[in-house]
Image (tube, rainbow, N blue to C red):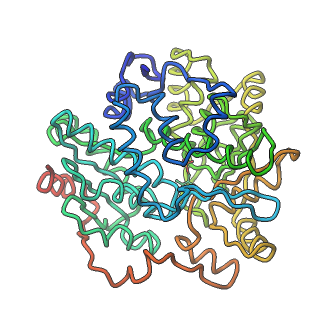
């Protein structure tokens, strides 16, 4: 399997090279040259396999330059620490199926990709005799999942900046109570945007980037998308077993278009997905893209589902590349236009094509809380606010006639404040997190100044 960039200047990469490159050197995103399609017979063969085995069957079709025994071991180790034997169990609640993606170490779906990516990085660095210093900024979920993905790993240090006092208490504790030597938590005196622009500046210094072998873990890495493709297969298998229906719909709480793009790949690979429902909060650039063919930025609003508070969805470029029939020239002009004007408009034909695969709805904060409340009253099950956005959107626009699977992207205890607002009680923290506030912490407070942070990285880098 070979990989190329959406922008056309990088071609013929192996899987290993693709993972190590992250963002393509031409500024584009990396994709496989072809998407393998499974026959109905091959799909049926997955039916009785445990999660890690399904993962191996899918991932091995893309990671063709990693020996099978090694890949199996990487996958097994990535999912052994999940607190549910099925890794991503599917539970029926009322007329819906909830795919619980929050059984990893930080209680959010990003663990599914980042546990795998951490092991993969360690394996590839060891092979190449290289090291990596990961730098990132987080508004909450990604930072803790990335830290848990690489804690204690050889040849990797990680520096994660979070805006001091502006992430939820549990998210902060999840990061700062990791005391492994290779993990550096920086509590930055500033906002998330300040921290993010410092990261960009540091990466923009190419000499520094090379000297310290800087790496990133953001959702543009192909290995992250790939690990997420697996649970669309797994969910379809479970639903089919339980209902006998072959076609299903998914509702996906969406921010950066990473998770739902994995669903698109699963559909291309032959999973009978009727439609993917794209659910956004009031930061609805992507819903507008699907409904009106209008991809134009607006201001970011704070919502009860903060991990979806984004305006520019970096993974959309991957989908646009398919929409433009893999025409890099067309894609490059579109991205340039977007950069210049903050706006892209699809024509009628493109809009029709998008709507063959996707439906979309926007869910505001009031509806999010009402959904948590009503769902709890009806079923006794507590949704986190991100999942509630997906449930509300799914209910509104499901085409009916086939099972609807809503992706549960976080455990409700991670967003206890919003849940409490909705149902007047706190969700119960899973056992691994009880007593977390009393654990020893490792965190450095630092001013939001690029020079200070660059020096800190230089002093503590591998
Ligand atoms: C990151 C995140 C999302 C959004 O996922 P994307 O891949 O960015 O679309 C949704 N819910 C939660 C809880 C998240 O952490």
Left or right, residue 255 beside residue 7 = right
Left or right, residue 273 beside residue 342 = right
**Considering the image in quadrants, where does the N terminus appear?**
top left
Considering only vertical position in the picture, is 20 above or below 136?
Answer: above
Considering only vertical position in the picture, is 31 above or below 255?
Answer: above
Considering only vertical position in the picture, is 264 above or below 287?
Answer: above
Left or right, residue 152 beside residue 269 = left
Considering only vertical position in the picture, is 230 above or below 189?
Answer: above
In the depicted view, which residue is nearer to us: 231 or 362?
231
Instruction: Please name the residue shown 78% across and 27% down the image.
Output: 352
In the depicted view, which residue is nearer to us: 368 or 406?
406
In the depicted view, which residue is nearer to us: 79 or 151?
79
On the image, the x and y values in percent for residue 139 come to 44, 60
On the image, the x and y values in percent for residue 219 come to 45, 44
In the depicted view, which residue is nearer to us: 95 or 163?
95
On the image, the x and y values in percent for residue 321 come to 56, 24
Instruction: Please name the residue shown 44% across and 17% down the image.
Output: 8
Numbered marks: total: 0
On the image, the x and y values in percent for residue 432 come to 43, 74
Left or right, residue 344 beside residue 145 = right
* Residue positioned most to the right: 401
Instruction: Please name the residue shown 18% across and 47% down the image.
Output: 155
The image quarter in which residue 261 lies: top right
């Amino acid at each position: 399997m070979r990989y190329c960039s959406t922008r056309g200047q990088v071609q013929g990469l192996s899987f290993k090279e693709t993972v190590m490159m992250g963002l393509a050197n031409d500024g584009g995103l990396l994709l496989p040259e072809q998407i393998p399609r499974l026959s109905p017979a091959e799909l049926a063969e997955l039916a009785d396999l445990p999660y890690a085995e399904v993962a191996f069957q899918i991932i091995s079709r893309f990671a063709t330059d990693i020996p099978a025994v090694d890949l199996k071991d990487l996958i097994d180790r990535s999912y052994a620490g999940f607190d549910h034997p099925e890794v991503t169990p599917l539970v029926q609640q009322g007329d819906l199926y909830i795919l619980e993606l929050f059984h990893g170490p930080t209680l959010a779906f990003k663990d599914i990709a980042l546990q795998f990516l951490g092991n993969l990085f360690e394996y590839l660095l060891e092979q190449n005799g290289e090291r990596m210093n990961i730098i990132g900024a987080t508004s909450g979920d990604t930072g803790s999942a990335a830290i848990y993905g690489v804690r204690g790993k050889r040849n990797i240090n990680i520096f994660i900046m979070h805006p001091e006092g502006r992430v939820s208490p549990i998210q902060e504790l999840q990061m700062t109570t990791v005391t492994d030597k290779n993990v550096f938590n920086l509590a930055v005196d500033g906002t998330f945007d300040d921290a993010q622009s410092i990261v960009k500046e540091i990466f923009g210094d190419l000499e520094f980037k090379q000297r310290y072998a800087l790496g990133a873990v953001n959702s543009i890495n192909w290995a992250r998308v790939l690990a997420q493709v697996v649970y669309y297969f797994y969910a379809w298998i479970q639903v089919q077993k339980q209902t006998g229906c072959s076609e299903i719909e998914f509702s996906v709480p969406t921010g950066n278009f990473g998770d739902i793009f994995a669903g698109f790949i699963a559909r291309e690979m032959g999973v009978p997905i009727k439609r993917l429902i794209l659910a956004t909060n009031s930061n609805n650039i992507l819903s507008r893209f699907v409904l009106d063919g209008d991809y134009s930025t607006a201001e970011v609003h704070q919502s009860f589902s903060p991990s979806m508070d984004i305006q520019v969805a970096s993974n959309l470029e991957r989908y646009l590349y398919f929409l433009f029939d893999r025409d890099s020239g067309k894609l490059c002009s579109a991205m340039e236009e977007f950069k210049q004007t903050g706006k892209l408009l699809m024509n009628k034909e493109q809009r029709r094509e998008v709507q063959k695969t996707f439906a979309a709805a926007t869910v505001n904060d009031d509806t999010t809380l009402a959904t948590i409340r009503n769902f709890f009253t009806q079923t006794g099950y507590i949704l986190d606010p991100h999942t509630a956005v997906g449930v509300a959107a799914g209910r509104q626009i499901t085409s009916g006639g086939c099972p609807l699977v809503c992706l549960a992207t976080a455990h409700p205890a991670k967003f206890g404040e919003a849940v409490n607002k909705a149902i007047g009680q706190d969700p119960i923290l899973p056992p691994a997190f009880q007593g977390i506030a009393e654990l020893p912490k490792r965190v450095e407070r630092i001013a939001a100044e690029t020079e200070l942070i660059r020096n800190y990285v230089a002093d503590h880098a591998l």
